[in-house]
Structure formats: C-alpha cells, structure tokens
Amino acid sequence: MVSIDNVYQKVLALANKEQRGYVTPQEFNLFADQAQMEILEQYFYDLPQYKQRVSDGSISELVQSKIEIFKSWTASITHGASLPNDVYRVNFCVLISTDGNSYPVEKMDRDEPNSFHATINNLPLLKPNERRPIYSIVQNKIIFDPSSGSYKINYIKKPTTPKWGYVVIGGKALYNSGESTDFELHPAEESELVYRILAFAGITLEKPQLVQTAAALEGAKQQQEKA
C-alpha cells in the first residue's frame, strides 16, 4: 500500500515550487486513479521483456512481486456467467473434477462460440472433457466446455480507486483519513505515482513546467536504478 496523503503532499510540494501551479484535491484524485492503472498495466508490458534478459532476473522478480498483490481467486463460477466486476485480467482457470483433482482449463479465442463448439465437438481427439476442458471469454461472459462442473478463475483484480479525502476548515482542504483510500500498489511505487500525477497535472492544467519537472525526476530515477 502507498499512502494517498504522502503522494498528494509530495505532488503539492513539487507543483508549488517556484509557483509552478496548484493541484486541487478533485484534480489529484482523477490523476491518481489514472496513474495507478497505468502503472499496473506497465507491469504486463515490462515483465516479458525482463524475463527474456538473464541479467534482469532480479528486476523480473520485483515486477512479479508487484503483480502478486493483485492476484485473486473467484468462488466457483458457472458456464455463461459474467466475469466479476473487479476482474482486470484473467490469469488461468481450473476445473475441480468429480474425483477431487484440479485440471487446468485451456483458453480458446473465438468470436462465434456456438459454431466453434460444433466444430471442435465433431473432432474426437480435440473434444473437450473433464480432464481437458477449455474456456473463452465472449462479451465479458465466460464460456466453459464441458459446460457443467466446478470452475474457478485466478485473476488480476482491479485496484480500488484511490481517494484523497478531506474536510474544508478555514477555506483550506485538510486531509481526512476516514474518507480516504490509499493506493494498492507496492510501496516502491510511491515516487512513480508522484511523477506520473505531476505529468498529468501539467498536461491538463497547461502547465508545461510541471511536465518538465516530472520528466526530469523520472529520468533521474531511471538513472539511479541503472547505477
């Protein structure tokens, strides 16, 4: 977890430096959610690249540990059911068979599930069964074959929307922890959140100085990581 208040105070400190601009709580909350989602998506872009380079093994493990925070399991889910609202990415599915064992469910991509099933079920060697089940996702619904059985999904859940809650006293917005929601990201992402939010604020508020500040800080961070 990353403290929402820590990030906001750092954003304000950098934005106000040399009168570069003020980021309101409402603007910050909008940018905060966007920054968190971009960082999460970046993990899935970075991880395959790091895995391909032996020298980046430790970085690959770090990225994987950051993703682990968001891994979750559904309860038993049935054929044709809608995916849970908090599903961001499906990792894999398993079928809990009648003999008590778990079998991996292979993903099949297709646009027309009915014709696909008709084709594959006419091929005895490919016909899905309890020990060789398949699934696909069509219009946010999950399709299993065999359609009966106890299935579970391992997935990456969407982070809770961050919020810097506040009360106004004397015309000033003061932090209210009871109305706030922290970022769900790994603690190591605090600086990245600050830089991204600064960049969003600079673009939206037409403050090029903020964008330049964010770019300079991000560049310094990357150089430090490579050292």
Image (tube, rainbow, N blue to C red):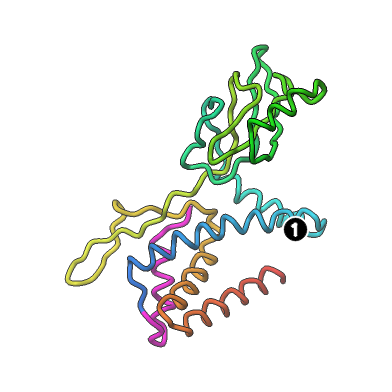
Relative to residue 21, is residue 67 drawn left or right? right
Q: Position of residue 105 (x, y in %)?
A: 69, 29
The magenta region covers 1-21
* Secondary structure type for disc 1: helix
120 is higher (above) or lower (below) than 89: above
Q: Residue at x 70, y 25 (%)?
A: 133
Task: Decide whether residue 18 is among the magenta residues.
Answer: yes
Q: Position of residue 191 (x, y in %)?
A: 53, 66
Q: Residue at x 44, y 49 (%)?
A: 160
Q: Quadrant of residue 132?
A: top right
Q: Position of residue 59 (x, y in %)?
A: 71, 57
Q: Residue at x 70, y 54 (%)?
A: 47
Relative to residue 104, is residue 84 drawn left or right? left
Q: Which residue is mark 1?
A: 49
Residue positioned most to the left: 170
Residue type beneath disc 1? Gln
